[in-house]
Amino acid sequence: MQRLTAESVTLGYDQRVIARDLTVEIPDNSFTVIVGPNACGKSTLLRALSRMLKPSEGRVLLDGAAIHSMPAKKVARTLGLLPQSSIAPDGITVADLVARGRYPHQALLRQWSREDERIVEESMASTGIGELADRYVDELSGGQRQRVWIAMALAQQTPLLLLDEPTTFLDIQYQIDVLDLCADLHETQGRTLVAVLHDLNHAARYATHLIAMREGEIHAEGPPAEVVTAELVERVFGLRCQVIDDPETGTPLVVPAARGARHTVPVWPST
Amino acid sequence: MNVQNGVRTRPARSAKCPAGGATRPARHAVRAIRTPGGLSLRVDVRSGLVVLLLAVAVCAMSVILIGQGDFAMPPGDVVATLVGNGTVAQEFIVQDLRLPRILVGLLVGAALGVGGAVFQSISRNPLGSPDVIGFGQGATVGALSVIVLFHGGSAAVAGGAVVGGLLTGAGIYLLAWKRGVHGYRLVLIGIGVAAMLTAVNHYLITKASLVDATRAVLWMTGSLDGRDWAQVRPLLAVCAVLIPLALVYGRPLRMLEMGDDAAYALGVRVERTRIVLMAAAVLLVSVATAAAGPITFVALGAPQLARRLTGSPGPNLGPAAAMGALLLLVADWTATSAFGDRQLPAGVVTGVLGGCYLLWLLVTERKAGRI
């Protein structure tokens, strides 16, 4: 049994069901990436796994216990999440923001232990923002800012870390930068990472385990080399393409078919 | 307790910052107070200093205010009387006549400061203050209803104000609720509700007899005149419970300022934190309004002024409380002594200040592109 699983969950907002009877296991110590077209339910699944969305049926299990009935802080010591949009409070410095990651380990009378201090320093060092500690978050570049948020999630010291589209809105060099950082965390610190990514090629290059979703269902999962095929990309994304070996890494690389050779059937979500 | 100097989260690293980085100097130190038993407090030095200075200013202002009046007393005598070394006459004047008024001002100011800071933090908007988003108006409807419709005494009027404020709080919460309460919706709905309640208040005054209408208008100005121990006791009880409660919840509230998702991820019980804090803030503002009438500006301005002094992110609840107390005492001092023999209610002074502040806020927020 893996540490984080969803057992036949039905997910949705208000009356709208986004995914029905979904069962997912996140392999321990994997870098799992969830991909799929817009509105396929990938972010919704991530929200359910991180207990922000309560399934209307089924349950999410963390270490064998139903995540929604566990104390919030206890969950937050095991499972971290980097949300898609977070607001840096006005006038906060990098070190102060990263320090907030220690919240689930603190209490009213245990607000700032030596360990907290050490872990915050380490988190900043391992994300390469140690030099920025005194800077204000609002004066950093987009890429630096994302590193700060990741450092905050690291300071939470959770064996599991969920990232909701960590590369969206970043320039390409920062996207790669953030993904390299994630791969480092996965490899050197042995954390289990689950990320939602838009770019299939990034997913194929960095993931150790890939989950492909469409319209609330999982169409394929497994190592990218097995999952990413031309047939699957057409089935899930409705895009004709070739899949070749990435000249840099040997992982699958999706090359969309040329305009003339492609009858475009974009898969819009059925509403 | 063992105060460890030099335990800073941020050693001076700015010198090593990459070339070209426009660094501002390190803001200010955060110190840790730690005991051998494993307890630790994270203390923002500048915020602590600000609270201390504001508290000193509040005490000084209180002594000045107690000393002034028909029977003037030098500050030394006031302090001596307060610690129990005054003459019988001085005891009577200080303990029975002037101290309760000052305490009401101090507590009302602190309650409004905390209430304002909580709402501005929850709505993430400096305009999201109780006197802008309808709670003050709601409390006024309650009080005026008692005056005009039931001709009740002052205790009943105070009760009406509390009930009015609480009902308005519940109403705005329900109207603004959509999978949680969010900033802009709270402010917009609150402003709408405030406008409607203001209309109700005007209607009540037109319906009132001349005597009731006079009483209603006096109450609506907000004043510390004639306040005695009967107002101090309930106010003190409510503040003694709710201000510490709000301060405890100030830690999760700080996390909420990063967005609900980020707060969830850190293990904050988001909606519970918000409900507890909003209930505490509404109650504080309602009780303050019941004791002194609708005092404007303090809830709006105190948190912002406090924030500018501390330079610290977050709701700054403690500094806001101290700033609120100081503002109201200064307003009262201005109202009673700056215009010679003509004494004004404190609410008039805070109203004038509030108008100027609101204009300034609108201009700066507009320049910053936030409205």
Image (cartoon, helix red, strand yellow):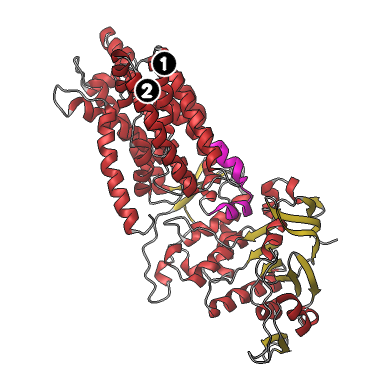
Most frequent secondary structure within the magenta stretch: helix
Q: Residue at x 56, y 41 (%)?
A: B274
Name the element at disc 1.
Answer: helix
Label 1 amino acid? Leu
Work out which residue is located at the far left of the displayed protein and give it. B340
Q: From this view, report whether residue B200 is shown above or below residue A143.
A: above
Residue B269: horizontal and vertical position, in percent? 62, 45
Q: Within 10 Å of the Cα at label 2, are there few (<14), some (14-19), or many (20+) other Cα atoms?
A: some
Picture quarter containing residue A86?
Answer: bottom right
In-front residue for pair A259/A195: A259
Q: From this view, report whether residue B208 is shown above or below residue B6.
A: above
Residue designated by label 1:
B149
Q: Is residue A94 visible?
A: yes
**The disc numbered 2 marks a residue on which chain?**
B
**B262 magenta-colored:** yes
In-front residue for pair B178/A66: B178
**B33 magenta-colored:** no
Name the element at disc 2.
Answer: helix
Report if the CB atoms under discs 1 and 2 are less than 8 Å apart. Answer: yes
Residue B253: horizontal and vertical position, in percent? 53, 45
Q: Within 10 Å of the Cα at label 1, are there few (<14), some (14-19), or many (20+) other Cα atoms?
A: few
Residue designated by label 2:
B204
Q: Residue at x 26, y 8 (%)?
A: B89
Left or right side of B236 for A70:
right
Left or right side of A106 for B282:
left
Q: Quadrant of the C terminus of chain A?
A: bottom right
The magenta span reads: B259-277
